[in-house]
Image (cartoon, coloured by chain):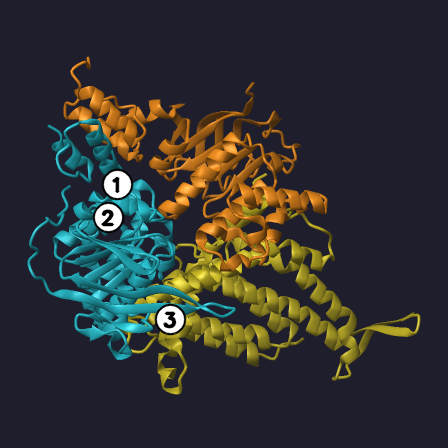
Amino acid sequence: MTHANGALGATPIRSSLLEVRDVTVAYRVPGGGANVALSGVSLAVHEGEWLAVIGHNGSGKSTLAKLMNGLLIPGRGDVIVAGMNTRETALHRAIRQAVGVVFQEPEDQIVATLVEEDVAFGPENLGLARDEVRALVQSALDAIDAQDLRLRAPHQLSGGQKQRVAIAGVLAMRPRCIVLDESTAMLDPEGRREVLDVVARLHRAGTTIVAVTHFMSEAALADRIVVLSEGRIALEGVPREIFGDRERLRALDLDVPPVAQVAERARALGVGVRGLPLTVGEFVTALP
Amino acid sequence: MDEFDFARGVTVGQYVPGNSILHRLDPRAKLGGFVIVLAAVITTSSYFGNAVALLAVIGLVVLSGIPLGYVLSGVRPILPILVVFTLFNFLFLGNYDPTGSRVLWRQELGIGPYEFAFTVTENSLKQTLQGVVRIIALILLTSTLTLTTTITSLAKGIESLLAPFRRVKVPGHEIAMVFAIAYRFVPTVADELERLMKAQASRGADFGRPGRFQFAKRARQLVPITVPLFVGAFRRAERLIMAMESRCYVGGAGRTPISLPRLVPRDWISLAAALGFTLAVWNVPWPL
Amino acid sequence: MTELIVEVRDLWHWYLRGTPLETVAVQGAELELRSDDLAAIVGHTGSGKSTVVQHLNGLLRPHRGTVRVFGQDLGDPRLDARPLRRMVGLVFQQPEQQLFDPTVGDDIAFGPRQLRCTPEEVRRRVRTAMERVGLGFDAYKDRYTFGLSGGEMRRVALAGVLALEPRLLVLDEPTAGLDPRGRAQLLDSIRALHAQAGMAVVIVSHDMDVVAELARSVWVLAGGRTVMHGSVREIFARVDELRELRLGIPQVSELAHELRRAGHRVRTDVLTAGELAEALYSGTSPSSP
């Protein structure tokens, strides 16, 4: 299973599907005062890329995810999705069709008592004709490799299966970008593998992915990483750049993936490890 | 022994698959029939009429192919209330008889400065007995409906029937949606309830019965269960709303219309039978 | 002088026993815990691990086999399990969902108050429990429970169980949903509870990195049975078996295993990045066998 990692060097100019322009989001706190979730954040998501957003709870990463499809409107600044400004409520339907969001809790995204019906929920909301809905559900279930789950009750599925069904529910609307807001946080290792396999497949097929996560090993699979800390962007770059600077990450209470840790320690002891391996596969080939 | 296992046996709105004619009827026919038969059950005011209505409902249960004992077990939880209700009516309703019917029994009682009278008149006796029969019949009838109809089916039926009323602002879709979602979460909440009880028991919470009439104490005992359930429910609702909005849900407007197959002869015949039954019950000159 | 505090032999348990929906959850599980254990129970979802641990404080009773906790036989129907819940503190998954009192201090005090402790004793226990989870007594005791962050709420819930001063602490998926910082903090607290408060600790987890970091012995459950047990090193060296059981493997162990398969001379019973680095170093040095 190989995933594309952005290479260092000149990146071809790609159109940005999503732009976050100098955005600030603050919540009023009971008892006066405000909690600033994001402060002056600017970010562009390019068509077809896999962007990972990492940070601690409270860093603003979930807020950022919700800005991307207009669930939240920034207090200051703008979020432009495929040329549409999320401030315009009339455009929300088009925006949410273009950008689908999969959330953290598998159980609380399911609306229906049959997988087939739940996946149909999105297309039905768009008022599409019955047979078109049926076709979209079919292709969405194919994309997540779950035709066998079609007539099952979502409540009885495993966490990984539920999240795949949630992804299908989003896919059925044919989005250009899928935002995963810590979608693997509540899953066991097998579930996480299931979901990441689907995400990788979608990415290869051209879907833009924004994955908010705190698993470094997941971020290592992305084309580009943005590190949020206390509502601001602390670091930005390709995985090799980000994970190459362990000091800076440690200063943010984060760390590099375990594989990279091994590489760093081994190199310090004198073992000839080439480059900066971030996955198990990369490490094996990095040794003489 | 397994004191916490009860929640899995929740039967409210439970669907039992089967192949009886009741199972195969269109939900709209069933809903219509339900309302019609219900009218007979709760409005007939003769002993014979009531008995016939109850027998008819029992007949429907038998027709459904679901064991009568199982359906009757739905009455058990309300038995205490039923007993209290019956007792009160029996003793006191006669004091307020506007029809001035014959007094069958009267007992006066003086406790200090207060005087009570227990009176049973012909009319009050009738009302009391009818009350019991109506409640039982109502429970059996409703159970039969939900036991033979899946929630999706019911929701579609409700939405379809209410669709013509959209002109007068009746939110048919939303009503159906509320039912469907509430029902879909019954097993989820049941699981959560079980976990909560186990978690609080692990902290030393005692759910033993404090005494028949210590309602306040009982309510206080249940705070470690009720508060987290409510808080959890609100959090869950919040997450569900975000997931639904992300999939472009804005209520019933513009949604793909519900498509139910045309009503077939057996649906019409069942409706006619229900109507015939109710008209008969109303118009037959019952001797009592 | 360690004692055997938990003995589970050939445990069987069914869900909804006697109903048409009856399913077997545990079929022949075994477990042994000593008073100084820092153990982990691992297994695929549906392996029965949660069911097994719910026997340890009497929430569930064995349907077949024996469960003996602190010398008490849970198979005896006359046994009142409630006093046992004082000695065995069971913390469920996402325990922050069980908080109910609007004041942090009062929620934590629930357990001790149920035990009929004197107000001074309640105060003492709450203070100690809060300190053990890293919540300052004065800073947090009057805070509004539902206004705290997720990580803080979890620590309040843990404190609520610690206030019972159990001798055995059982934690079901303690780090689920926590970010790296919260996770590190919680693991530190757990280690301190074991080392300083002398509690025996068992975690149930499917996060193998947590298990590798924290536990000293591991019990592996699959299909309702105990299939492996041993020291954490022994167990994680058996990567192929764990894979066959569809279990996760600590990333470091996985790497060691793959390196060995690729022909490098490394030990596979490593648990930390440092250990693997050392193993690589000694594996490539000329003096290695």
Q: Give the secondary structure at mark 1.
A: loop
**Quick one: A9 or B39, which is closer to the camera?**
A9
Q: Are marks 2 and 1 on the same chain?
A: yes
- Residue position for label 2: A219
Q: Kindly identify the amino acid type of the residue bearing the numbered disc 3.
A: Gly
Q: Is residue B38 left or right of residue B29?
A: right
**Quick one: B274 or B241, which is closer to the camera?**
B241
Crowd rating for badge 2 (residues with CA inside 10 Å; few <14, some 14–19, many 20+): many
Label 3, label 2: how many angstroms apart (C-alpha)? 47 Å
Crowd rating for badge 3 (residues with CA inside 10 Å; few <14, some 14–19, many 20+): many
Chain designation of label 2: A
Q: Is residue C286 left or right of residue B71?
A: left
- Residue B119 x %, y %: 81, 73
- Residue position for label 3: B157
- Residue position for label 1: A257
Chain designation of label 1: A
Q: Residue at x 61, y 80 (%)?
A: B285
Q: Residue C101 is drawn in which quadrant?
A: bottom right
- Residue C283 x %, y %: 20, 20
Label 1, label 3: how many angstroms apart (C-alpha)? 53 Å
Shown in orange, the chain is C
Q: Kindly identify the amino acid type of the residue bearing the numbered disc 2.
A: Ala
* Residue A262 makes an appearance in the image: yes
- Residue B232 x %, y %: 48, 58
- Residue B159 x %, y %: 37, 74
Task: For the C terminus of chain C, give its image quadrant.
Answer: top left
The answer to whether residue C97 is above or below residue B168 is above
- Tint applied to chain B in the drawing: yellow
Q: Residue at x 12, y 33 (%)?
A: A285
Contact, CB < 8 Å: mark 2 with mark 1? yes
Q: Residue at x 74, y 57 (%)?
A: B213
- Tint applied to chain A in the drawing: cyan
